[in-house]
Image: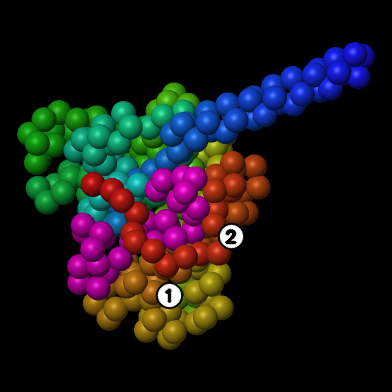
Amino acid sequence: MVLSKIWKSKLTYLLLVLFVAASCATLRTNQPKPTLYLIGDSTVKNGQGRGDGGLWGWGNFLVEHFDTTRISVENHALGGTSSRTFRTQGHWSKVLPKVKPGDYVMMQFGHNDSSPINDTLRARGTIRNNSEEVQEIENLITKQQEVVHSYGWYMRQFISEVKAKGATPIVLSPVPRNSWNGGKVNRNSGDYGKWAAEAAQQENVVFINLNWIISDRYDLEGEEKVRSTYFNTRDHTHTIEAGARVNAAAVAEGVRQAKKLELNRYLAKQPKASGVASGR
């Protein structure tokens, strides 16, 4: 009788453990996957992301470096935008409502921020620093009054808004252009790379020095190879597919180096050839 009661207790306990384990597994299965959102300019997604003119952004191939059974990657970058116009033209307002707790937002701007602040062509420039400085203008395109801020200010706004959604912002320095001096690729450690790092540090978020990771590789491979392998002869900013894949691998390496970044756990063990990241 005593042994029978003992075995009944053990069986009840075992069934309880199995029930709890099954419930947890079901809960995990029903939870939505986190999403990695990409925002930026044409070096992240060129054109419509179809390789028009043979040019590609690194965001199209970043998905190959993640386990997409556990995380989704959405590329919402848009060519021609700066940290300012990605907001003022309404592109950010389409992405931000989708961001949920547990998601990640990776941002890379800067290539277009050096454009004029006010002109009849694009009016997309930002103040060239990471200050609270402002410039009031009547936008020559929209014919509206606008307060223009610094590049760093716009980056800090993205960061704070992502944090408010319970998601994780990740700041990247802009990829290097095909621009050389004395056999070394020109880096942006004195301007946009510097200001991006400062903005990230002020907000206590992860900064990936993508410009340096790629530049180190370029320097090792040499100017001749880089020019002929990763770019075409007409464009010194946008990469062809081979260059975009190199840049995507550099982004994944930056994530891997950021040991405290939980996005690490979603990296694929081996990069896989697959479709491009979804987006607009």
Spot occupied by residue 275 in the image (x, y as percentages of width and height): 34, 61
- The answer to which quarter of the image holds residue 243 is bottom left
Q: Which numbered circle lies on residue 240? A: none
Q: Is residue 54 magenta?
A: yes
Left or right position of 253 against 187: right
Looking at the image, can residue 129 be seen?
Answer: no
Q: Which residues are magenta?
A: 46-73
Q: Residue furthest front?
A: 1
Spot occupied by residue 252 in the image (x, y as percentages of width and height): 52, 57
Quarter placement of the N terminus: top right
Q: Which residue is mark 2?
A: 269
Left or right position of 154 against 209: left
Q: Which residue is mark 1?
A: 180
x 64%, y 42%: residue:
260
Asked which secondary structure carries label 2, the reply is loop
> What is the distance, in whole Å, between disc 1 and disc 2 at their CAs?
34 Å
